[in-house]
Image (cartoon, rainbow, N blue to C red):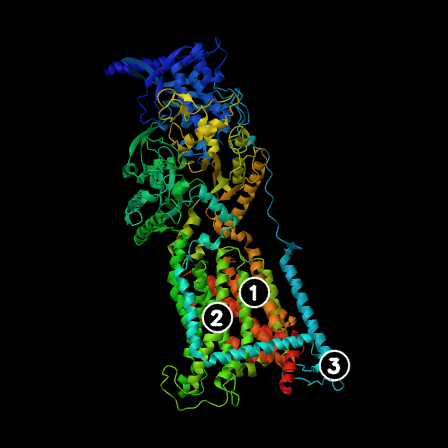
Amino acid sequence: MSRATALLTLLACLVVLEARHEPGYCAFYEECGRNPTVSGSLLPPIIPCLNYSHARALKGEHYQQLKKVCPMLDRGEGSTTACCSIKQLKSLEMSLMLSKAVLMRCPSCADNFAHLHCINTCSPNQTTTINVTRTMNITTLGIVKEAVVGYQAYLSTSFADKSFESCKNVRIPATGGYAIATMCGRYGSALCTAQRWYDFQGDSSNGLAPLDIDFRLIPEGVTEGIPDGVVPYAGRALGCNEMTPTGAEVCSCQDCQASCPVVPSPPPPAEPFTIGGVDGYLVLCVIFLCVLILAFLLFVLSTYLLRKEEGKDSEKGKGKGKGMDKNGNNVNERLIEPWEVTCTDKNSLATQEILGFVFQAWGTLIASHPLKVLLASAVVIAVFATGLMHIELTTDPVQLWSAPNSRARMEKDFHDKHFDPFFRTNQLILTAPGRPGHVYDSLLFGKQNFSGIIAKDLILELLELQKKIQNIEFWSNDLNRTASLKDVCFAPLNPSNSSLTDCAVNSLPQYFQNSVDNLNAKVNMTELGVTKEVDWRDHFIYCVNSPLSFKDITDLQLSCMADYGAPVFPFLAVGGYENEGYTTAEALILTFSLNNYPRDNVKFKVALEWEQRFLDIVQEYQKSPGNPFTFRSLEDEINRTTAEDIPIFMISYAVIFVYIAVALGEYTSFSRILVDSKFLVGLGGILVVGCSVLASMGFYAWIGIPSSLIILQVVPFLVLAVGADNIFIFVLEYQRDARRPGEKREEQIGRVLGNVAPSMLLCSLSESVCFFLGALSTMPAVKSFALYAALAVLMDFVLQMTAFVAVLSLDARRQDGNRCELACCVTVKTTAPSKPSEGFLLPVMRKYYAPVLLHPVTRVIVMVVFIFMFISSIYLMFYVTVGLDQELAMPQGSYMLEYFKYLYAYFEVGVPTYFVTTKGFNFTSVTGMNATCSSVGCDPFSLTQKIQTSSQLDTTVGANSWLDDFIDWLNPGSKCCRLYSVGPNKGKFCPASECEYQKHCVYTPTNGVLRPDMEQFNLFLPDFLGNRPDLQCPKGGLGAYDKAVTCVSVLLATRFMAYHTALTTSKEFTAALKIARELAHNITLSMRAIPGTSQDFEVFPYTVTYVFYEQYLTIVSEGLFNISLCLLPTFVVCCLLLGMDLRSGALNLLTIIMITVDTVGVMTLWGIDYNAVALINLVTAVGISVEFVSHMTRSFAMSIQPTHVERAKEATATMGSAVFAGVAMTNLPGIVVLAFAKAQLIQIFFFRLNLVITLLGMAHGLIFLPVLLSYFGESVCVRAWARVNQQISH
């Protein structure tokens, strides 16, 4: 038997060798049966029979079939000959359909592809282009036939290259990738060439080719190595920008570069502002600085010369000079006559008198009934605080930072209403630093470098972890049953009845369908006479280059598709590679996608619980060897961070309380320490602050305005700074005051309150109005903060005027009775000194600090230094970084920091971006389809084409289009859309897996541009969206597009997906948003120009990050607006309460502006980004600056000293000491404690920024402002002079 077989084989070889290569002859004809050497094929591997014979003349059905499948061979009925039977033509048609499903977008490409295989299979001159190399005998129905199992096909490089060029850019809209990537095996699209493309088509191990074809590409003029009589086929291949002979249109721009219209290059980025090649802002600031300093020096010089000239005549005028004071300052000052007091001055005096009288009477009343006042205050606070039962704490970042009426928020709401919310991502990244790699000598792919992370043991370890996570189960009270991943996972191909294998889990093990057996599979394979073992590495190399393949080209014959039915693109499986070097990746990526349910959906809590279990497993896994990191939502980690840092804030407040309690005491002797201490007063002040915050929060909770964690952190700190200052001013004034003869204690407290309360009112009212105006901000976090802060400051002032006055009255009674503070029953015999105590700070500032500060030389130096600081900060403002990088929201040591580091280093693509269309555009019209699609016949500037053009400009990567794939799905050239022709479902849609030769849904017009009519569009669109893609029909819309179209009788909304490039910083995210919006606006205008389109139709871009980064498009103007609104009341209130003193109001405003500008300048130097959190702190800075500045300004304005310098000295010593003790020294200890917080957000925006604000406020309020007032304050205090005169007259 073996001898007979050998003999038959020898005869077959002889026949092959004796076959002649001449025109008009066939090498094979008719089908012989299945190829026994091919297994696991995706199509029946039917091979032809060896048959050296004349080409057959075709007629009738045979001719019509050839004309349909291979029109390029048609020479007219009766004149056409071919080397293929009807069966061969039908098999060829079926085979070509699979390719046409992805190539028909470009008719010339599909025509060239069919051209090649028609020449090989049916050419009447078949023997002149092919050379049969292998045959074998097969038995079919008991008949032994000699079949061809391998041949050489000779092609000219001109035909081969042009065919390849026509196909290499054809897109697959569903994935955004290239069709050629699925047809070039291990090389993918990036490394594919004409030879490699043809080699893949001729490889029987690819699951599609029924036999081996050795394509030989021969350059023109080369004859060496070509069998006699063989002429490489050199037919005319069509360019992708050419029409086909059957009249099909040229390929679209997206699939053919040659068809693209000339697109102007984007304008170059704006050149930096320069003057003479130097930074323009620097030049202007230097000029401005020189002008200001020169003007100030001229002012000082002219003032000095003028006063020197006046000094010579000082004996002659009414106002006699006093020469020089002990600091060397000129104190010549003209005295004021009574007739010079204007009506405005009298009104101002009346205002001060009325305020002083009212507050004096009020203070006396409150001090006389302290217990009743405290009880009434407690009742009022309790009423307000009961609102806390209804408080709503906002933790959702979207609600916190994006206004409900903002564009991004409305676009998000529109998207989430018409499509599902953006899915939740739970991601794990594994690295293996220091692990050695290896070189793998592959039979098919040659030597390949494998990094240490791409190792079988780590892949198995990842698979084990993946399965452990997939198998998470827990009892859900919300579902009243056991819940698992399948209840909440994103299952694109089976959303209604998901199993665990339907869940979208992307990882490297998915290339092996999560099977350990597939990973361990090995097989010996022979290639070109070399036999080697192939294993998981060969399969991995193939799949990362051809992720859409249902079968690899190795003898392993494994699929590359994930177990849930979709491809896993390499950037979702590995990271940290260069170009296409996937085997050298430095990280493995594991991603679980969950549905993002609305917060009122019960499954939202189930998803959170699953994520918590996921996080628990990963954190437990982190303790084991290896270096995995994971991702969970920012909201969760921010909340965890805030909870951990609450003790830091508590310690900060405790430190402030201890300082206030100690600093308020007036210690005259050791024996009276417990009598003179002010622990209870300090505690009362702290309680007043706390109660004011509780009242504010309770009130807004009553009326339904939500709070946030940032309010809990910042508002108490702000109110404490404001309240402590007022407490110190009041208490120190009381301690420094001597009780007048016959004056009761309550009357003394009332009189002291009458002196200081107008100043306290000035600051509190300025700050409260400032924050109320700040509530006009569109940012929810800034708005709610401003509202809470405004009411809290106002309530703090009210409680200070009531409860704190009562507390001080009770403490004064105790102190007058020499009773100890902590033991009221214990009295001390040592009596209090008769002279009021000035404390430590006031004498030091009066004797040393003020004289040095107000020395003529010091004053000039101070002005020059602060002018330099101000101008420098203006320059630095132009370079402050806008944004908030997401890793700053994480605590130090958080796993999230490592995750972000690896994400930026290893992830190769950015977030998906959707271009969403609203209602009002007619997609069912031919014009509408052409304005949207990107395949053959579409407008060169259509919606999807513009997205693709933008992708080439590095805005987005790839683009998909449900409309393009819907048209391809309808095309009869594919097997996708068929109708039942018989049976109960006659006329209804029939899936390709069930119907091979049923009726087509539509027919292609002669020009190849298929456009369904309105009825067909509406009829078949639901079928397309529900059709699961498979090998027979890869264009099915389920999974890719079923959630991309919302249709209720009309199309209400659709979306087209692309990818942003990998973005890492706030600046990049913001720029991407801006460019995407510009692109969408351009698309909107062009689509509105189409007749019949509603003028409110719109295209807008949406991705999950836009709601967070939109604020940075306008935050600079928003910040300027908010801060300007806050500055306005500081000027107005100051002027009003000082009796229309415009000059004092202007100097007050100037100093606060300088503090704010200098703060932004230091932010630039210290790396503090400008964002919504910083804006809240800058608004706070205005409020705290009022405390540093306004008290000093009023003290100077009301001073009765005769000269600028003397008034500045008095204000610096008396009020400056209180401000230093009350604001600066209250804030600093608490701020320093914040440096120990774990959260970087707190360290940067609360520790650093508040430290800067406090130090700059202290420097400007206690150094710059006294000097400024000494130069530019009112020349004389007319109101104070008038007050003295009134006191004398009385």
Q: Which residue is label 2 attached to?
A: 796
CA separation, marks 3 and 2? 50 Å
- Residue type (three-letter) at the residue carrying disc 2: Asp
Q: Contact (CB < 8 A) between labels 1 and 3? A: no
- Three-letter code, disc 1: Thr
464 lies above or below 285: above
| Relative vertical location of residue 425 with respect to residue 213 in this rendering, above or below | below
Q: In which quarter of the image is residue 1268?
A: bottom right
Which image quadrant is residue 490 in? top left
Could you tell whether 912 is left or right of 34 in the image? right
Residue 1162 visible in this rendered orientation of the protein: no
Disc 2 crowd rating (10 Å Cα; few below 14, some 14-19, many 20+) is many
Mark 3 vs 2, N-terminal side: 3
| Residue at far left of view | 1
Cα distance in 3D space between marks 2 and 1:
24 Å
Mark sitting on residue 310: 3
Name the disc covering residue 390, or none.
none
Secondary structure of residue under mark 2: helix
User: Please, what is the three-letter code of the amino acid marked with disc 3?
Assistant: Glu
Please state which of the two labelled residues, at mark 2 or mark 1, is closer to the viewer: 2
Q: Where is residue 396 in the image (x, y as percent from the top left)?
A: 42, 53
**Residue drawn at (54%, 55%) of the image:** 1115
On screen, residue 420 versus residue 235, left or right, reads left
**Label 1 or label 3, whichever comes before in sequence order:** 3
Q: Where in the figure is residue 137, as x and y percent of width and height?
A: 30, 16
Element type at mark 3: helix
Q: Distance between the residues labelled 1 and 3?
A: 39 Å
Earlier-in-chain disc, 2 versus 1: 2
